[in-house]
Image (cartoon, rainbow, N blue to C red):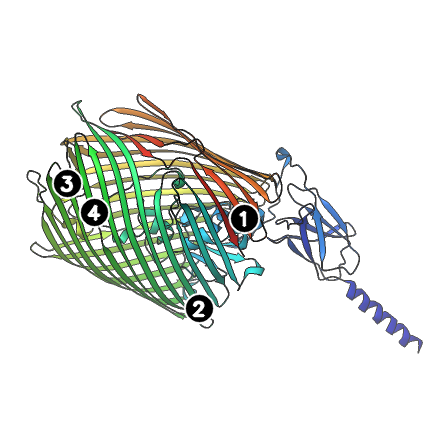
Amino acid sequence: MRPRILSLLLALLVSCTAALAQTAVSGIVREKKTKEPVAGAFVLGLAASQQKAFAYSDGEGRFVLKVPEGVVLDEIRVSMMGFAATKLPLVPGTSTGIVIELAEQRTELRAARVEAAAVEEKGDTLSYTAGAFRDGTERSMGDLLEKLPGITVTPSGGIQHNGKAIGKLYVEGMDLMGARYGTVTNNLSADAIARVEVYQNHQPVRALQDISLTDRSAINIILKESVRSTWLFSGDAALGLPPFPLFEARVMLSNFGKKRQSLFLIKGNNDGGDILQELQQQSILGRGPGAYLITPGEVDSDLRSRLNPGRSYLSLPKEYWYDNLSGLGSLNHLVKMGETRQLRLTLQTAGERYNETSESREEIRFADGTSLEILENRTMTDRRGYFSGTAAYEDNGATRYISNEFSAAGQLRVNESVLQGGRNQYDQRYDLPSFKADNLLKLVLRRSAGRALELTSDSKYRRTNHSARYVTDGRDNGQHLFGQDYSTDLRTSQNWSAGRHRISLSEGMALEYVDRRAEAEGVTFEGVITSGSLSVLALRPTARVSDAISLGGARLTLALPATLHYLIIRGHDNLLYPTLTPSSSLQWKLSRRLELSASSYYALTRSNAESLLDAAVMQSWRTLAVSDSLRRSTRWNTQATLRWNDIPAMFFATLSGSWSMGGSNRASSSIWLENQTYQYYLPLSTATSGWSVNASLKKYFGLRAFVVELQGSWMENEMQEYLQGELVNYHSARLHTQLNLASNPVWWFSTDITGSYDRDFVTGSSKQQTQMVQIDGTLRFKPVKPLAIDATGHWLWSEIPGVRVSNTPLLKVSASWSLKNATLFVECRNLLNATEYRRESVSAYRTTSSITQLTGRQFLLGIRMSR
C-alpha cells in the first residue's frame, strides 16, 4: 500500500510542476504617465538570472514570450530608447495579463544604441512594427511608409522600395486597388496599421513561383486586430478664408477583411490639395511605367496628344500655390470567391478647375553672340472631368492562373489662357476630349514542378479629338488633331527550371492600327506642311529568351528580346525594320548585410508610328513642331549598386554608379523668331553620353530618437543640338548634396529638417554656373498630451550669373487638440504672406526667369475624425 501512495504523491508533484511550467508569458507594455501602449520595447524573460526568452512589443504594446519546456520565468526586464529600464518579478504560475509601465527618461544620443526591436528579417521578408516608427505627425499610410528604411512615396501615392516601384500593394493579403492604389496610400489612417511587411523579389502568380523570378518587392499592410473586418470611418471637414469659403472635405468608409474588402471615398477642396493625382495608374508588374512619367497636372498619360498645354510645377507644397477647386469619388469592392478566385470592381470619377498666374523671361543665346528675349505673362484656367472603371477577375491557383481585367477611362478637358507676349496679347484655348478602353487577359498553366506555359492577350483602344485656337491682333489661327489607335498583342511564354537555370522563351504577334489627321487654319511657316493625315497598319512579331542562373548567393539574368516591325503606310512605301534590347543583370548577396546589383543593356529602338505624320502641329501660340519621322536611336547603359543593410544596428548605406552612351540618326533643331519658334529634326547623326555617382548613408539612433541621412551625387552629360542651323555641343554637370535630420526623443517633441545644395555647370553657347540652396523642415511641440503645435517651413535661395534670388520663407503653423475619435485643428498658412515665388535656371543656350503667384496668407479651422 505504501509504494502505491508514494507513487501517487510523486505523480501529483510532477503534475503540479508541469502546471507551473510556462509555455508562454504575455502582457502589455505601456507608458507610465499616459497609459498609452509602447511599441518596439525589448522584453526579456529570465529564470535564476539566466536569459530564457525574449520578444518585442507590437503596435498595441502587446508581447508574448515563448518559454522553453520545463522553464519557469521569475523575472521580466524591459528596455526601450527614451525610457528607463524596468524589472518586474514574476510570481510562479503567472502567464497572462502582465502590465509593465515604463517611465520616460531623457535620451543621451551619443551613447544611444538601438536594438532593432521593431524590425524582423526572415528570408526575403522584412517586417516593421508600425508603432515603433510613428511619432504622431503621420496622418496617412503614406506618411508612415516614408519613415521606414528603404521606402519612398511619391505625391500621387506611388511606392518605391530600394529605388524600384513595387509590384503589388496588399492590405491584409488582398489586392483591392490594383495599379491605382494611390487612394489607399494617401487616405488610409496610419493609426489603423499594426505592421508593414515587405516581400522582396515577390512573384504574385503562384503558378510561376520558383520558375519565373522578379526583382520587384510587394508591400502588405497588416491592420490592428481591432479594425480588421470592421467598417472604418474617417473624415475631414475644414473651413477658412481668404477667399471665403476656403474648404476641404473628405469622407471615407472602408472594410478590410479576409474575404471581402471595400473602400468608398468622397473628397473635395479648394485649398491647394491636388487630389486627382491619387487616381493615377502606378507602375506595377504587368503594366507600363505609370505615374512616374506623368507630367504635372495629368491623370492618365494615355489621354494626351501633341496638343498638351502645360502647367507650372514648383518644388514646394502645393497648398502655397495650387489654385484649385477639386472633387473626386472612388468606389472599390473586392470579393474573394473561394480559396483562389476573386473579383475586383472599381469606379472613379473626378473634376477640377485649376487657375495659374505667372510671368517669365527667357533669353536665348546664339552662337554669333546675339540673343533673343521672350517675355510672357500668363493667366490660365484649366478645367477637366475624368472617369475610369475597372472590372478584374483572378483565379490564382497553384497550378493554374487566370486573370482578365477590363478598364475604360475618359476625359473632357478645356484649357484657356490669356498671354501677354512682348507687345501683343494672345488668347489660347484647347478642347481636349479623350477616351480609352483596355482589356488584359492572362493565363498560366503549370505543367510540372519546373515548367509553366503563359498566354497573354493585351488589347487597347484610344481616341482623341483635340483642337486649339490662337487669337492675336485680329489673326485667328487654329489647330485640329484627331487620333485613333487600336492595338492587340498576343504572346505565349514557356517557363521552366532546370537545376540552376530559370529559362523563359516567349513569342508573340502584335497588331496596331494608327490613324492621325492634322488640320491647321491660318498657320503658316515658309516651306512647312501644316495639314496632313497618316494611316498605318503595323505588324510586329516578337521573340524573347531569358535565363536566370542561380550561382550560390548570386543570380545572373540574361535576356534577349527582339521585334520585327512591318509598317503598311497608306500612300507611302512600306517599311521593315528590327528593334532589340539585349540585357544582363546581376544580384549578389555578398553577405547577410551586403548586396550587389548590376545591370547592362543595349537598345536599338525607333520612335512610334505616330511620328511619321509629316504635318507640323501648332502646339502653342508660338511653337510649331514637326515629329522625328521614326527616328532610330541606340543606347548602351550600365549601372551598379552596392547596398549595405545592417538591421540590428539600423545602419543603411548605398553606393551606385551609372554610365550611358547613345546616338540617333535625327538631330533635334530649332529656329527662334520674335513671335514664333519652329522645332524640327535634321537628317544628321548625333551622340549623347553621361555618367553619375551616387552615395547615401542613413543611421537610426533609436528608431525615433535621432535619424541622420546624408546623400550626395555627381553627374555629367554630353548632348548635341542644332540652334538656328548651328551645332551646339552641350555639356552639363551637377553636384548634389542633401542632409536630413529627424528626431523624436520624447513624446512631446519631434522635428524633421532637410537641407540640400545643388551646383550646376553648363557649357553650350557660353559657360554658365548656378547654385541653389533649399531647406524644408517640420517641428512639433506638445505642451500637454492632447495638444500639438506644429510648424513647417520652406526656403529657397538660388544664384545664376548676375542674379541672386532669396524667396520669402513659406511658413505654416497649426494647433490641434486630440479627442477620443476626432482631432480639432486650426492653422495659418503662408504666415509671412509671401505673394510670389521666383525661380532661375540656365541651360546650354537658354536662361529662364519665372515668377509664379502664390495664394497668400490663409486661415483654416476644422475637424478630422476616425473610428
Residue type at mark 2 is Val
Is label 2 in contact with label 1 (beta carbons under 8 Å)?
no
Q: Nearer the viewer, mark 2 or mark 3?
A: 3
Is label 1 in contact with label 4 (beta carbons under 8 Å)?
no
Q: Which residue is mark 2?
A: 335
Q: Which of the marked residues, 2 or 3, is nearer the chain's N terminus? A: 2
Q: Which of the marked residues, 1 or 4, is nearer the chain's N terminus? A: 4
Q: Which of the marked residues, 4 or 3, is nearer the chain's N terminus? A: 4
Q: Which of the marked residues, 3 or 1, is nearer the chain's N terminus? A: 3
Residue 454 location (% of width, % of height): 34, 66
Please tell me in which quadrant of the rendered image residue 407 appears.
bottom left
Q: Nearer the viewer, mark 2 or mark 1?
A: 1
Residue type at mark 3 is Val
Is the residue 641 above or below the residue 175 in the image? above
Image-based side of 21 in relation to 197, left or right? right
Please tell me in which quadrant of the rendered image residue 789 appears.
top right
Residue type at mark 4 is Tyr
Q: Whole-Å distance between the Cαs marked 2 and 4? A: 42 Å
Q: Nearer the viewer, residue 66 or 507?
A: 66
Q: Whole-Å distance between the Cαs marked 2 and 3? A: 54 Å
Q: Which residue is mark 4?
A: 430
Q: Which residue is mark 1?
A: 823
Q: Nearer the viewer, residue 710 or 863?
A: 863
